[in-house]
């Protein structure tokens, strides 16, 4: 994409955001909505700036949890996908339980992790990984299935082993699917971090939301939500950048 193309790609979302914020500001002003119910964007910005040190300190804690949980989800997700594709028996035995794992409400399972491990970093990382690993597994499995059958037949004709078939055939074909799953998991990791901190933490942005809610500090709570959104966008952007760097052939196509 050329420089002008990149600029045009950013103009529409930025313009929409400005229009949305302007309409929000006007509505709160003309309707005389109390700040405790719906603060205006300017009040949120002011509250965020006044509490910037508190927000930054807690943001670093949440970012660390998200990165650890996301990394664990990648490792578990990729290994599970490889195991599922290695055997039809494993696929029939494991795949349904992967679906079942997503039916369990996260707020219900998080306290159990706390009981098992204690009030430290581990239950939060486990909750984030539990929330994020499912799209990675599903997309990776679909990607491994998407390998060109003609290429696989050619490799078998040349005497390729199962490991070589995976390395030169199935795994490269799965990468675009895998990155699609990683993008979804990046967004889910932020949600998982908030749930985890609600249950088993005395720090982090998720815990800070509970504190601010009890204090009816709605403006600062909105600032925390905005900061969590920025973290999610940043992680999504890192995954997209890695995709662009590692799969230039796919991006070009």
Image (cartoon, rainbow, N blue to C red):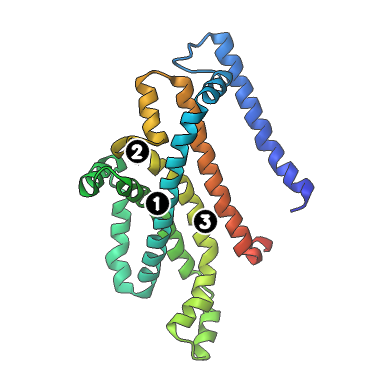
Q: Answer with left or right where residue 15 lies relative to residue 88.
A: right
Q: Alpha carbon of mark 2 to alpha carbon of mark 3: how far?
A: 27 Å
Q: Answer with left or right where residue 72 lies relative to residue 106.
A: right
Q: Residues within 10 Å of mark 1 (few under 14, many from 20)?
A: many
- Which element type, helix, strand or loop, lies under badge 1? helix
Q: 150 or 240: which is nearer to us?
A: 240
Location of mark 3 (residue): 180
Q: Is residue 3 above or below residue 78?
A: above
Q: Earlier in the sequence, mark 2 or mark 3?
A: 3
Q: Is residue 170 above or below residue 31?
A: below
Q: At 35% across and 38% down in the image, what residue appears?
A: 197
Location of mark 1 (residue): 69
- Which element type, helix, strand or loop, lies under badge 3? helix
Q: Answer with left or right where residue 20 lies relative to residue 47.
A: right
Q: Earlier in the sequence, mark 1 or mark 2?
A: 1
Residue 103 location (% of width, % of height): 30, 48
Q: Residues within 10 Å of mark 3 (few under 14, many from 20)?
A: some
Q: Earlier in the sequence, mark 3 or mark 1?
A: 1
**Marks 1 and 3: in contact by CB < 8 Å?**
no
Residue 197 - label: 2
Q: Quadrant of residue 191?
A: top left
Residue 219 location (% of width, % of height): 48, 21
Residue 101 location (% of width, % of height): 30, 52
Q: At 31% across and 43% down in the image, what residue appears?
A: 106
Q: Alpha carbon of mark 3 to alpha carbon of mark 1: how far?
A: 18 Å
Q: Is residue 49 above or below residue 186?
A: above
Q: At 54% across and 86% down in the image, what residue appears?
A: 154
Q: At 70% across and 43% down in the image, what residue appears?
A: 9
Q: 167 or 119: which is nearer to us?
A: 119
**Marks 2 and 1: in contact by CB < 8 Å?**
no
């Amino acid at each position: 994409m050329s420089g002008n193309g990149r600029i045009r790609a950013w103009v529409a979302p930025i313009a929409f955001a400005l229009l949305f914020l302007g309409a929000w500001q006007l509505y709160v002003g003309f309707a005389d909505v109390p700040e405790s119910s719906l603060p205006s964007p300017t009040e949120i910005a002011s509250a965020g700036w006044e509490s910037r040190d508190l927000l930054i300190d807690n943001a670093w804690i949440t970012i660390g949890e998200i990165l650890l949980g996301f990394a664990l989800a990648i490792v578990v997700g990729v290994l599970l996908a490889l195991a599922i594709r290695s055997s039809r028996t494993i696929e029939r035995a494991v795949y349904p339980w992967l679906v079942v794992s997503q039916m369990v409400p996260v707020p219900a399972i998080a306290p159990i992790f706390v009981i098992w491990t204690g009030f430290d970093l581990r239950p939060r990382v486990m909750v984030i990984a539990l929330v994020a690993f499912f799209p990675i597994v599903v997309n990776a499995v679909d990607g491994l299935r998407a390998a060109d059958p003609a290429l696989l037949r050619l490799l078998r004709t040349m005497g390729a082993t199962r490991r070589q078939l995976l390395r030169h055939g199935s795994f490269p074909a799965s990468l675009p699917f895998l990155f699609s799953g990683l993008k979804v998991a990046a967004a889910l990791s932020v949600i998982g971090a908030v749930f985890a901190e609600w249950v088993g933490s005395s720090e982090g942005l998720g815990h800070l939301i509970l504190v601010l809610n009890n204090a009816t500090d709605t403006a600062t709570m909105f600032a925390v939500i905005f900061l969590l959104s920025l973290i999610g966008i940043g992680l999504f952007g890192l995954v997209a950048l890695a995709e662009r760097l590692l799969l230039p052939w796919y991006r070009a196509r």
